[in-house]
């Protein structure tokens, strides 16, 4: 198998080579290959000791294949062709990449947007199999999805026990609840953290049900595994050395590219892996997905199809293992623990507090600083800002040296694809129509007007990804949060809130966490979602 790291920049290549030599002299590749938990210092050792199982997954995960094969055979026999995955972060991003690359259909619910969940519920419920994936077993989004689907199945005269598969860690509260409900339970390796879990049951079970060849995926990882034991010809070491050396030299923005690649969507998975692993103690590497490089002196370009920077070539199974290894190496170079996520719980706790304090009343949104058509603007604004275009200009001007702008959208990430298009429209015309209704288009419009990186995250999924970096990494971010009015909500059975209320509480909870760090934060609330998206895109073009 051809797995290689290519450097398109001589300076990057020289820095990486020097770092590889130093790491090899320190015995890092041999120590990491055998799972030495002391590599990241004494404070990280206890955590690392129970988080290095990903190194052996190409072998250990094969034990799951017979059980997964039986599950797939049963689903096929019962004509359960609509596979829905309820999971967040590492539980959803890897299966999404695997299935997109394998060109098989998987509906991913990593959202609390009621419109997105309603759309999934309306799609072939009679032929749906739901995979509920949660390492902790207490993820609020996933718990909500499970409850909603249980009710929907019962209302349709379907026994949830015939349709729900649970993937979780041994001993989690979800495992016990699933056993009591008679659900199929497949346990994941507890010695693997969520963002390193692509080759565990979390990545393999939903992907296999959707039709992906997971045995081949493990074969690809197994082929590259022996290369990770030494210093010479070790692609994981070379990549990790490049990432770490670049960050230490000030190039701590990692622009990820995958254009024209046969692997679809890998940057989104890499984003979570690197941002959540390295963004802490005021340090970190910020992945930038979906944006063109600015050729700024704080950027490093990397990807699986890129002319400059660092090019990583190889099949998907090997890519997973190489990037995990590289992230662990970069973490050592930065002097941080790449296996914990100390700031992730903060926004979750804020959400719970906001829901609890709100009771049955309105949530504490405050009063808008200004209203521009279907968009309410909340936050501290300069006195001369009178409209949405001025808001964007003010935010861009507040980005500090070596800083970034993060757009955080608590909306339906598939809504633009539901916009009607003329049947005779070409692919380019269809793409233009979708872009005109897609909040993510805002990233490109604002990035065009600044030399600083602009990132885009869908809430609440980014909370399990770049959310750690925003709060634990370098405090040089500026934040633009987008929420929207809910036209048709969904009650979460057994809980005192709807999905729409939970979604807004999550947005407000993260807003509190960011403001508590003194960062510039503005929230745009779309009182009419479709009109609001069009209005904010038009305003961004005027900046």
Image: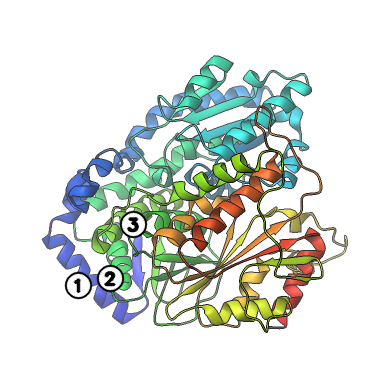
- Tell me which corner region of the image, top left, top right, bottom left or bottom right, holds residue 441: bottom right
**In the rendering, at what x and y percent does residue 304 appear?**
45, 64
Q: CA distance from mark 3 to mark 1?
A: 18 Å
Question: Which tag is nearer the camera, tag 3 or tag 1?
Answer: 3
Disc 2 residue crowd, few under 14, some 14–19, many 20+, Cα 10 Å = many
**In the rendering, at what x and y percent does residue 70 appear?**
53, 22
- Reading the chain from its start, which is encountered first: label 3 or label 2? 2
For residue 36, say whether it is visible: no
**In the rendering, at what x and y percent does residue 227 appear?**
26, 52
Q: Given contact means CB atoms under 8 Å apart, are the residues at marks 1 and 2 in contact?
A: yes
- Tell me which corner region of the image, top left, top right, bottom left or bottom right, holds residue 207: top right
What residue is rendered at 42% in x and 31% in y? 188
Report helix, strand or loop for mark 3.
Answer: helix
**In the rendering, at what x and y percent does residue 462 appear?**
54, 54
Which numbered disc covers residue 327? 3
Q: Quickly name the residue at label 1.
A: 18
**Residue in front for this viewpoint, 125 or 105:** 125
Report helix, strand or loop for mark 2.
Answer: helix
Q: Quickly name the residue at label 2.
A: 245
Q: CA distance from mark 1 to mark 2?
A: 9 Å
Q: CA distance from mark 3 to mark 2?
A: 12 Å
What residue is rendered at 17% in x and 50% in y? 30
- Reading the chain from its start, which is encountered first: label 1 or label 2? 1
**Residue in front for this viewpoint, 452 or 185:** 452
Report helix, strand or loop for mark 1.
Answer: helix
Total label count?
Answer: 3
Which numbered disc covers residue 200? none
């Amino acid at each position: 198998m051809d797995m290689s790291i290519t450097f398109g920049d001589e300076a990057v290549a020289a820095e990486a080579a020097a770092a590889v030599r130093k790491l090899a002299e320190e015995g890092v590749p041999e120590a990491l290959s055998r799972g030495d938990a002391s590599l990241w210092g004494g404070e990280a050792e206890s955590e690392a000791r129970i988080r290095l199982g990903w190194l052996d997954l190409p072998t250990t995960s094969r034990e799951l294949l017979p059980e997964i094969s039986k599950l797939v055979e049963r689903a096929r026999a019962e004509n359960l062709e609509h596979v829905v995955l309820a999971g967040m972060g590492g539980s959803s991003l890897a299966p999404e990449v695997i299935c997109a690359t394998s060109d098989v259909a998987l509906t991913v619910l990593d959202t609390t947007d009621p419109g997105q969940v309603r759309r999934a519920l309306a799609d072939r419920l009679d032929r749906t199999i739901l995979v509920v994936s949660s390492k902790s077993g207490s993820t609020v989004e996933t718990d909500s999805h499970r409850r909603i689907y249980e009710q929907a199945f019962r209302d349709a005269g379907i026994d949830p026990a015939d349709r729900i598969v649970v993937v979780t860690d041994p001993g989690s509260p979800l495992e016990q609840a699933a056993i009591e409900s008679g659900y199929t339970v497949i346990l994941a390796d507890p010695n693997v953290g969520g963002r390193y879990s692509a080759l565990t049951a979390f990545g393999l079970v939903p992907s296999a049900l959707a039709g992906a060849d997971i045995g081949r995926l493990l074969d690809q990882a197994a082929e590259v595994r022996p290369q990770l034991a030494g210093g010479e010809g070790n692609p994981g070491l070379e990549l990790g050395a490049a990432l770490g050396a670049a960050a230490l030299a000030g190039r701590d923005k990692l622009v990820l590219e995958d254009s024209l690649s046969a692997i679809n969507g890998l940057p989104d998975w890499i984003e979570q892996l690197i941002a959540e692993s390295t963004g802490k103690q005021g340090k970190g590497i910020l992945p930038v997905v979906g944006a063109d490089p600015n050729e700024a002196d704080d950027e490093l370009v990397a990807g699986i199809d890129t002319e400059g920077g660092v090019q990583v070539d190889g099949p998907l199974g090997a890519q997973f293992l190489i990037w995990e290894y590289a992230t662990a190496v970069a973490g050592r170079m930065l002097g941080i623990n790449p296996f914990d996520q100390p700031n992730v719980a903060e926004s979750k706790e804020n959400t719970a507090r906001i829901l609890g304090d709100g009771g049955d009343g309105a949530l504490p949104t405050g009063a808008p600083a200004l209203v521009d058509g279907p968009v309410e603007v909340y936050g501290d604004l300069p006195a001369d800002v009178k409209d949405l275009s001025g808001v964007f200009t003010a935010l861009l001007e507040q980005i500090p040296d070596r800083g970034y702008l993060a757009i955080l959208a608590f909306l339906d990430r598939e809504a633009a694809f539901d916009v009607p298009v003329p049947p005779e429209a070409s692919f380019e015309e269809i793409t233009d129509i979708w872009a005109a209704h897609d909040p993510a288009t805002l990233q490109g419009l604002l990035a065009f007007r600044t030399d600083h990186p602009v990132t885009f995250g869908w809430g609440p999924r980014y909370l399990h990804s770049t959310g750690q970096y925003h709060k634990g990494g370098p405090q040089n971010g500026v934040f633009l949060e987008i929420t929207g009015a809910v036209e048709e909500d969904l009650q979460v059975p057994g809980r005192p809130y709807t999905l729409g209320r939970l979604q807004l509480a999550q947005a407000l909870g993260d807003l509190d966490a960011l403001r508590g760090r003194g960062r510039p934060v503005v929230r745009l609330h779309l009182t009419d979602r479709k009109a609001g998206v069009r209005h904010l895109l038009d305003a961004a073009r005027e900046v």
